[in-house]
Amino acid sequence: MKLCTWQKKGFSLTDATQKIDSINCSIYYVQHKNKFERLWKQLGTNQFIWCYSTKEDAVCSASTLVYKNHTLWELYIPEDEIFHAICSIAWSRILSNCRCCPPLQLRWAWQRADLSKASKVEEEFHQFWDSKKEEELWDILFSLDGIVTPCSTPLVRYPLNEKWISGVLVIE
């Protein structure tokens, strides 16, 4: 499966002697330490790579997140090596406890299907997510049976096999 991941420049995706600690310095971790620790406890590890299921999602996220001094890597991960897939929308709401926009690709699909119904579908999307309490979001977070582009975040155990790294897509 073709995936992408942003990592700090100089970070080795394959070095088993390194530990993933870059998230500990991020603003998200500082603001939501208990939520990350709960996620790690539920997954049984914090040694995994956060991925995007499409290059477009990764590049779109880069426009809203701070990725200075980062590299966007393209990966080819065997499906049976994907450690977990979490619901991106549930994770965003767990962290921010606010409305998030439907993923851009979903909005485009709704608009292509029928422009007159796009705003109604988006309203129903928000009604569904607004009705969920945090504990329900944690249940939804782990409810995916597989990768649902663009609504899921694939997680891959660290370190990666060198054969899975296709190359560098973007250096910021």
Image: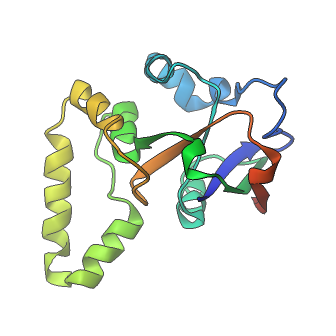
- Viewer-closest of 55 and 155: 155
Rendered residue at 60%/55% (across/down) = 62
Image vertical order of residue 113 relative to residue 31, above or below: below
Residue at (35, 32) in percent of width and height: 94
Where does residue 135 sit, x and y in percent of width and height?
Answer: 24, 24
What quarter of the picture does the C terminus occupy? bottom right
Observer-nearest of 83 and 27: 83
Q: Which quadrant holds residue 150? A: bottom left
Q: Where's residue 85, x and y in %?
A: 45, 42
Q: Is residue 41 left or right of residue 74?
A: left
- Furthest residue to the front? 80
Q: Is residue 128 left or right of residue 80?
A: left
Is residue 128 something one can see in this rendering? yes
Q: In front here: 95 or 147?
A: 147
Between 67 and 49, the residue placed more toward the observer is 49
Q: Residue at x 48, y 24 (%)?
A: 43
Q: Quadrant of the N terminus?
A: bottom right
Q: Please state if 112 lies on the left or on the right of 150 as rendered.
A: left
Residue 56, by quadrant, is bottom right
User: Residue 149's spot in the image, x, y percent?
Assistant: 43, 60
